[in-house]
Amino acid sequence: MIQRESDLDTWFVYMARCKDGTLYTGIARDVDARIAAHDAGRGARYTRGRGPLLVRAVRRCASKGEALQLEHALKRLPRVEKEKLTNARRLGAFSRRLFAERR
């Protein structure tokens, strides 16, 4: 797959359900490749032995910095709140509110 220059700056935040029912939140430029790495045991230490992962929500971000900020905000939420955000529309609304507050 050939990536356009604009694709190289695109980052995504993703929420994935692990085999044990827990949620994992991460960032990647290529979510499919990152999930494959997790499933192969080459991803984050937390996901090793917890695969296969099922992607529940993905949000495109304007920059790596924005992706890191959104990931951090998501990881600080209680599990009940994270569960509500596994719907892509709710994750988008959460992201818009987060960055509107910071402007």
Image (cartoon, rainbow, N blue to C red):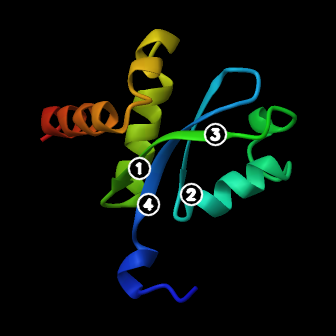
Residue nearest the viewer, comparing 71 with 21: 21
Which residue is under mark 3?
54
Q: Position of residue 29 (x, y in %)?
A: 52, 64
Amino acid type, label 3: Leu
Quadrant of the rendered image containing residue 26: top right
Q: Earlier in the sequence, mark 2 or mark 1?
A: 2
For the N terminus, give its image quadrant: bottom right
Residue 53 appears left or right of 84: right
Other-residue count near label 3 (Cα within 10 Å), few / some / many at <14 / 14–19 / ≥20 = some
Q: Position of residue 7 (x, y in %)?
A: 41, 76
Query: Is label 3 in a helix, a strand or a loop?
Result: strand
Which residue is under mark 1?
67
Query: Is label 1 in a helix, a strand or a loop?
Result: helix
Other-residue count near label 4 (Cα within 10 Å), few / some / many at <14 / 14–19 / ≥20 = many
Query: Closer to the camera: disc 3 or disc 4?
Result: 3
Q: Position of residue 25 (x, y in %)?
A: 55, 36
State yes or no: discs 3 and 2 in contact (Cβ < 8 Å): no
Q: Quote the CA–CA distance across marks 3 and 2.
A: 11 Å
Q: Earlier in the sequence, mark 3 or mark 1?
A: 3
Q: Quote the CA–CA distance across marks 3 and 1.
A: 20 Å
Residue nearest the viewer, comparing 55 with 99: 55
Q: Quote the CA–CA distance across marks 2 and 1.
A: 13 Å
Residue nearest the viewer, comparing 81 with 100: 81
Q: Earlier in the sequence, mark 3 or mark 2?
A: 2
Query: Is label 4 in a helix, a strand or a loop?
Result: strand
Amino acid type, label 2: Val
Which residue is under mark 4?
11
Disc assigned to residue 31: 2
User: Is 41 located above or below residue 24 in the figure?
Assistant: below
Query: Closer to the camera: disc 2 or disc 1?
Result: 2
Query: Is label 2 in a helix, a strand or a loop?
Result: helix
